[in-house]
Image (spheres, rainbow, N blue to C red):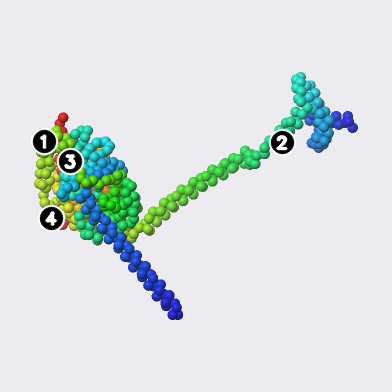
Amino acid sequence: MHEDLNQKISQFLDNELDQDEALSILQKIQLQPDLKDKINRYEAISHVLKTDVFLYPSSDFSAKINQQILQEPYYLLPRSHPFTENKLFKHSNKILVVAASIAVVAIITAQGVNYSDNKIKTSSTVQLAQTQAIEQVSKPSAYRYGNEPSSVNARINDYLQAHNSSVYTNGEVNFRPFARVSAYSQE
Amino acid sequence: MMVGKNFFLVLFFSITTVSAGNTDLKSGNVSEGKRILLNMSKAMKSLNYQGTVVFLRNGKLETMKYFHAANNNTEQERLVSLNSPLREIIRDANKVSCHFKTTKQIVVDYRPFASSFLLDIPKNIDDLGGAYRFDLVGEENIAMQLADVIAIQPKDNFRYIRKIWVEKKYFLPLKVVIYDFSGLPLEQVVFTELEVKDSLPFVNIKSLDKASSAENKQSEQSANATWLESPAQPAFVVNELPFGFQEVFFTRSPVHNSDQLVDHMVLSDGFSSVSVYMENKNASMQSGLQSIGAVNSFSRAIGDFELTVMGEVPATTVKFIAEGIKLRGRSN
């Protein structure tokens, strides 16, 4: 029986036992400390025979490793998904992100419409009439107030300068006086 | 049954009383708003005050020192720019002089239809009851001074809404905003600090640059001559005007960099002003609507002339006025 057990240990180290026999021998090793020492010795002999290098670990080497593993904290993190699942997850994420973006844009647009609607609703009827009236007029094109290359806007610019005093408060330099009067000091 | 009748009677009288109270409150606010504006109009003319004012117009921001001197019914407004181009602008009655400090150029201008760099205020606010409501809508601090907020609400669709923040002690305007129909500000004039003085000096533009005084004298005389030589009537007739608008000024003078004469009429309701220009038509002229900030313009051909109506009013207003203008002595 004893020789038979030694034989089994040797086969276990050479990976020659089937799963049931391997589990059985491991259970016996756990229960009998002398068997654990024996398997350590056999393992060292096998290593020397295979590699010509002798490394002698302390008897409690594997016990310490085992102890260290048991002391490792257990992280309650989700398990990483296999590659295919991960890929699917990312793909679904992309769809969700696009859907969420569209939803956000839709909400903002709707709120913008509601906001302007609310403003009109809270305004007086006069303002409402004004809004309706202004919509009937085609939208005017904007023109700049500064130096204009276009003769059309230059004409409008001249009119604007003659119309009000804003020419004095907007930093214009080359404006024409309304009454066409100018003087330059000669130094 | 009797209990039900009593209930409805009490309910009816309660509603009537509350409505009457609201009406009184509202009319009280309106008359209070008008009273504050009248006080402001007087204060703007009679007090000596100075401060720092920010103009936000046509997307441009300009910060300037502002001075208003008053003495024996004579006023002088003065603006000094804090940023380039450095310049000082002086308004004496209808004469506006601008002195550019770097180039030493002086530009003299005559604007008999405007009375303030800050805002236009009608001479008789009571006459504008048919065009505007003047509501006291609250109190706010501007430049660390408590101010009444007056909303000038138009009663038709021909003008913009304005708000004026009037300082409570001296009734001086601290902030003026013109809003478009969506409630967005189109133009703003805001004081960042303002103080009232016992007196402020009147500044002579010539004293700013003595070297140019001789030339100025001649230039001013020719300016007066140009202005006074204008015909009494424009070549066009304005047939339709929004309520409250009336002609305040007309001249025929060169406006562009040429001797081309342009008829220029200014119409105003006291708060909003509109200019009508007419000159000989040429191929480069473009008809239609254009806008910048609070200013809209509408141009169209009329006979051999090009007509443009422009002002701080909605696009509908300039179009309405332009379409009602005809050449003088013609049926169309």
- Callout in the foreground (4, 2): 2
Pointers 3 and 1 within a single chain: yes
Name the residue carrying label 2: A70
Q: Nearer the viewer, residue A164 or B32?
A: B32
Pointers 3 and 4 within a single chain: yes
How far, Cα to Cα, is label 4 from label 1? Answer: 45 Å
Name the chain under label 2: A
Q: Residues within 10 Å of mark 2 (few under 14, many from 20)?
A: few
Q: Secondary structure at mark 4?
A: loop
Q: Amino acid at mark 4?
A: Gly
How far, Cα to Cα, is label 3 from label 1? Answer: 17 Å
User: Quarter-wise, where is residue B86 in the image?
Assistant: top left
Q: Nearer the viewer, residue B145 or A110?
A: B145
Pointers 4 and 1 within a single chain: yes
Is there CB contact under 8 Å for labels 4 and 2?
no
Name the residue carrying label 4: B329
Q: Residues within 10 Å of mark 3 (few under 14, many from 20)?
A: some
Q: Residue at x 76, y 26 (%)?
A: A58
Q: Amino acid at mark 1?
A: Ala
Q: In the rendered structure, which disc, 4 or 1, sits on the residue that comes first in sequence?
A: 1
Q: Nearer the viewer, residue A23 or A65?
A: A65
Name the residue carrying label 3: B203
In the image: residue A141, left or right of residue B250: right
- Callout in the foreground (3, 1): 3
Up/down of B295 relative to B257, above or below: below
Image coords of residue B317 (percent x, y)? 25, 54
Q: In the rendered structure, which disc, 3 or 4, sits on the residue that comes first in sequence?
A: 3
Q: Secondary structure at mark 2?
A: helix
Name the residue carrying label 1: B214
